[in-house]
Amino acid sequence: MIHRRLEEGRGRCGLRGNVNVSLLMLSPEQSTVTLRKLFSLALLWWSSMWVATGGLFFTGYYNGYGSMERNLYINPGMDFHWGMNPAAGKWRDALKEASDLAGWELKNTLDGHEAEFIQKIVKEISRKLHIIDWSIDETLVGMETRVKNVISSLEIDSEDDVRMIGIWGMGGAGKTTVARAIYDNISIFYEGISFVENVREGSKGMGLKELQRQILSAVLNDRNIDVPGVSDGKNMMKRMMLGRKVLLVLDDVDDIDQLEALAGNSNWFKPGSRIIITTRDKQVLIAHGIHDDNIYSIGLLSDDEAICLFSRRAFRREVPIQGYEEVSRKVVHYAAGLPLTIKVLGSFLCGITDQPKWIDTLERLKTIPLDKQLKKLEISYDGLEKDHKEIFLDVACMLKGEPKDKAICILEGCGFHAQIGLEVLEQRSLINISNYGILGMHDRLEEMGKNIVRRFHPDKPNRHSRLWIKKEIEEILVKDWGTEATRSMVLKNPDIHPAIFMEGLRKMKELRFLCVYDLNFSKKWEIDEGVQYLPDTIRSLHWSHYPLCCLPKTFQANNLVNLEMPHSHISQLWKGGEKKVE
């Protein structure tokens, strides 16, 4: 409903904030009130201070008002006379000023439909406010121009075609940051939206059909969608998304098969849809038919942009503090414009007021070959407390991609102060947490963590604290080389019998985290009770397609805080009934 009368005393509300929306109308019963409002509106428009702060002004004309005031038309029913009213001169000026304001007339917009008229105003305001917000997003230091350029090329107002674009660059350059900023700022203009994070890892872990299901669920707002297989998923996406204007972001794609499964062809989507793909491999984009004009190299930060980003992390300001200008330039020069490295080093050096320590850090960097990114990033790891180092290694080797709440539960079950630990890692730019609460970590940092675990005994994997390489795990289990050093294990699609697997666990008496993706054994297995075994020290047990009907009778689950056994054959936890867990 459009209210035809405003209470006196509310006129000042429009003088505050970034946006002023004025709906102007004129009728006999309220002409005096209307002209008073017009005078306030004119004062607001005349205020150079308000306009200078970036305020937005929107004007709507109801019942043809836009044409009435241009001729200074005065309704005969007005309850005053221009010549006799002392305020007439001010009102006349206000009326003239209002006639010059650009606006929309209801009768000439959307066939006079009031609800759609209001939606048009709200949509335009949302577009403007998104643009205003870019300048205050600290994650976009040095990226604002890149974001605006890509959005401009998307031509979001055009509905003539389906457009696929690629954002290409090296790891840590800010591809995901740019894609996320674009997504957040233009998603309001689409009927269905989906941001698929880390397609490269997701396609290996969950599989492409799960990513297809994720897209369909988000776009159609239906969590109950089931995708039987990748081929079925392709047909479903083409059939079900064709009627919607879609915004789809596929982040970190590294294989053409992923694109063929998730955005196979433009004819899958309704005209006006936009698909954004981030990748390190330009050839993947070319192979998918994306023209070079629609591939944007993210590039590295300029010296000024890098200094600004580093200063925000290290000094919590736009420029280095006095006395640290030169050493800051040296750090930025070392980072060579890579946002990830700049953020990691800035967070590491934040709070260190002893300049010799900065210089010592730079000297250490000089001794590390430039092609060894792992060593560069390890500087932040070295500055962590012991417990925080362990949490970092657990995320790198086991918990990346897991929900934050689940990770906290598991880590606290292992005796860590997980909430604080994860906050420290996030502050040091060693991990990130998505909008959906999922633990993330840059690939280079993940590799660094795994390298740390393996370096102490590179030729003796049975002495590693964490195991994730299938070949090494199976050799350890088959040859019964297990030791108490192993605390975590992730095994995907084992090629050994469950009996051999369980027997091989007997020497891993300190195992805390066990994750088995056993897709190879879909049938039920019968194993002698004497062979069945799980270490009592386990805190988290995830075993998909568990082949037995129950847990080992000897397994005391007193330390267990997380149990996940999807698609398993288990019918009861322990044979013979329940067991008391203290």
Image (tube, rainbow, N blue to C red):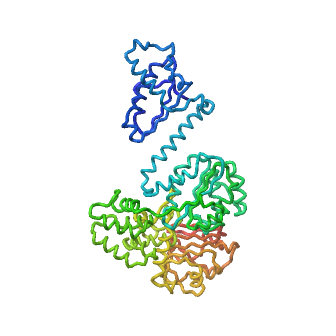
Q: Position of residue 437 (x, y in %)?
A: 50, 59
Which quarter of the picture shows residue 576? bottom right
Q: Position of residue 220 (x, y in %)?
A: 64, 50
- Residue 10 appears in the picture as rendered: no
* 16 lies left or right of 23: left
Q: Is residue 246 above or below residue 257?
A: above
Q: Nearer the viewer, residue 257 or 227?
A: 257
- Residue 432 appears in the picture as rendered: yes
Q: Nearer the viewer, residue 31 or 163?
A: 163
State the residue at coordinates (44%, 70%).
391
State the residue at coordinates (59%, 85%).
475
Q: Is residue 319 above or below residue 41?
A: below
Which quarter of the picture shows residue 42? top left
* 437 lies left or right of 116: left
Q: Position of residue 343 (x, y in %)?
A: 41, 64
Q: Quadrant of the N terminus?
A: top right
Q: Position of residue 282 (x, y in %)?
A: 59, 66
